[in-house]
Amino acid sequence: MRSPAQQELIGAVRGFAQRYLPDRRVCVGLSGGADSLALTAAALRAGLEVTALVVDHRLQEGSAIVAERAAETARALGAQARVLTVDVTGPGGPEAAARTARYGALEEARAGGPVLLGHTLDDQAETVLLGLGRGSGARSLSGMAPWRAPWGRPLLPVRRARTRQACADWGISVWDDPHNDDPRFTRVRLRREVLPLLDEVLGGGVPAALARTADQLRADTEALDVLAVQLLTEARSDDGLDAHKLAAAPAAVCTRAVRSWLLEIGAAEPGARTVAQVEALIADWHGQGPVAVGGDAEARLVVTRRASLLRADRAAR
């Protein structure tokens, strides 16, 4: 007989599959921790054909042993399993670099299929709280989407404690990543210190409330994105964008349209300051000069306004 924790996880995966997965074949990103192992077990028991993809970041001594042990556990549960070895390099600190390497390996190995990830309601709450602390916009505060092809997160409604309980009920041995207890990482301190204190001060229910906030903001953001696409289509011409049409739109829609256009013309992840400077060419036009939005060693990419038209140009350095 299945325990309540097992039933909750299997139900979450089964409901997710019915909504998003017409093909029963999936990959699962497996770390060997309780969340991803519980997801693997639940997916198999929900009738999915699972290939577990274990990424070895090679950041800790003995990581290859940990990765192979996770793969063996997945095979014992009835899944196929592969170990993917990556090099963690690049900007943004070790967390960001490891994430980039991990997603790159999963993308390459998924063979066109979906990849299920073991993020829980607690992970969602931490993501929203990080965004609040950093002053991020609604897109960041909307957290992780349950489904954004090819990435699926069936366990977002499930608390982290339930995945550990389900693993215990199934008799699955889990690996606890020491990085998850290292206070040098901001997310660890949020998890261990900030969220418990906030939950105590506000009388409980904070993780679930933060997750609900993410759901609500995601719905709002998706609706505004649709309006931004329509605005961009209406403002576009062969020579650029009509500033008057952009200025007539609500600010939230205009901002999204401008950011989408900047990405389209080659600006690399334009930040809030760059977007605001371009918006000033629209809503606060008084003859100011071009706004630099990117470029390369040979030329700057700039946005200029001429009469009522926004244009993207290259200016020699």
Image (tube, helix red, strand yellow):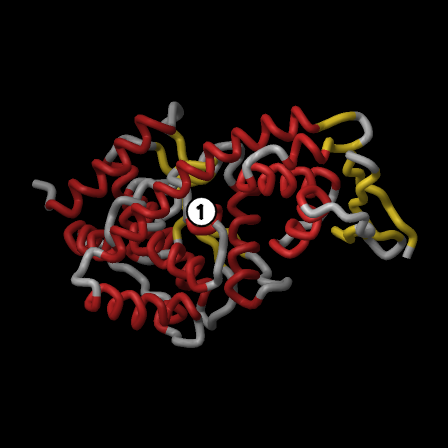
In this view, the residue farthest toward the front is: 286
Q: Which residue is at the front of the view, 276 or 122? A: 276
Side of 94 relative to 126 (left or right): right
| Pointer 1 residue | 53
Q: Is residue 76 above or below residue 182?
A: above
Q: Residue at x 59, y 29 (%)?
A: 229
Q: Residue at x 92, y 52 (%)?
A: 316
In the rendered image, residue 112, in percent from the top left (x then y), is placed at 53, 32
Q: Residue at x 56, y 55 (%)?
A: 101
Callout 1: helix, strand or loop? strand
Quarter of the image for residue 145 reads top left
Quadrant of the image for the N terminus? Answer: top left
Quadrant of the image for the C terminus? Answer: bottom right
Q: Is residue 260 above or below residue 59?
A: above
Side of 226 relative to 89 (left or right): left
In the rendered image, residue 27, in percent from the top left (x then y), is placed at 42, 39
Q: Is residue 19 above or below residue 199?
A: above
* Residue 251 at least partly seen: yes
